[in-house]
Image (tube, helix red, strand yellow):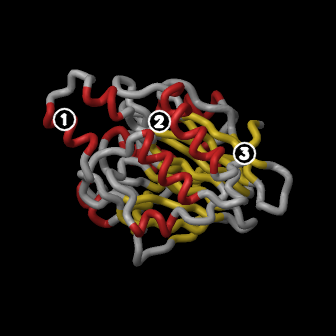
Amino acid sequence: MTVLYVLGSGSRGNCFALESEGVVLLVDAGFSAKEIERRAASVGLALDRLAAIALTHEHGDHARGAARLAQRFAIPVLTAPGTWARLGGDSGTAYLPIGLEYHVEVGPFKIEACPTSHDAAEPLAIVARDGDGVSVGVAYDLGRPTVAVRYLLRRLTAIVLEANHDEVRLRTSGYPPVVQRRIAGSGGHLSNRAAAELLAELHHPALAAVVLAHLSQRCNSEEEALAVVGPALRRVGFAGGLHVADQDVPLTPIALAHPTGVQWGLAL
């Protein structure tokens, strides 16, 4: 069994973890190392089993605690070469490239990645697969879902996908027009509507769990995101668990099993 930990997601920090066969993989580390350790302990996640940190891109809300944690636990950072260069290529931290040309194995996990459309050096969507056939994708800060992203996220057990903003609330948010254009543009973030459309397209009978992530505190809410994404998933027959990541409080861990098993995104 693989367990997905949603330690927090939003504009002030993003961090997820996967645990399988006693090995932990962190996907993004957008809080301080101390805060990530505190949140992990609160949901029973033992970071002394941490084997690697995979980073989607270099922005602080995704990478803030990565170097400190990597050094503390003597583990590698997995990310795109452009992201690593933008982070400074810390010589005190081990590094392994991931992307279209680079697949990495860490413990039971096989990590794949592809580029996304975002205003960062070399942003990625990331998929981790374990030896039991469980696969989890993390895709946020992606502006527009490219063909590569759609291909990477196909036939997964669980998908973490951003539902950043409600389009009407963004237009009435008080943000300057240039900021609104950035958020809604091809290098920005997915709206609730865009997330719903993509998830409906990616749906398949074995999709066990969906986590809506990176919600804007000013331009969205859990209720609004669920009101748009929930009906879209129900229309295509989604029978798994639909969750919304919180900025400040980790979710109850989500247990995932191979499609032939009986667990479907159940809270532990």
User: The disc labelled 1 sits on which kind of residue?
Assistant: Val
Q: Which mark is residue 9?
A: 2
Residue at the (50%, 24%) spot, across then down: 248
Front-most of residues 208 and 20: 208
Q: List x then y, in percent, for residue 147.
A: 40, 68
Instruction: Inspect this view and state whether residue 190 appears.
Output: yes
Q: Earlier in the sequence, mark 3 or mark 1?
A: 1
Q: Is residue 170 above or below residue 104?
A: above
Residue wearing tag 3: 265
How far apart marks 1 and 2 lie (CA) works out to 20 Å
Q: Position of residue 78 (x, y in %)?
A: 44, 61
Say above or below: 201 vs 33: below
Q: Can I make out residue 32 in this image?
A: no
Few, some or many residues within 10 Å of mark 3 (<14, 14–19, 20+):
many
Q: Along the horizontal axis of the image, is 92 left or right of 232?
A: left
Label 2 crowding class (10 Å Cα cut-off): few <14, some 14-19, many 20+? many
Amino acid at pointer 2: Ser
Residue under pointer 1: 179
Pointers 3 and 1 in contact (C-beta within 8 Å): no
Q: Nearer the viewer, mark 3 or mark 2?
A: 3
Report the front residue among 254 and 62.
254
Which secondary structure, mark 1?
Answer: helix
**Residue 251, horizontal then vertical, whole percent:** 62, 32
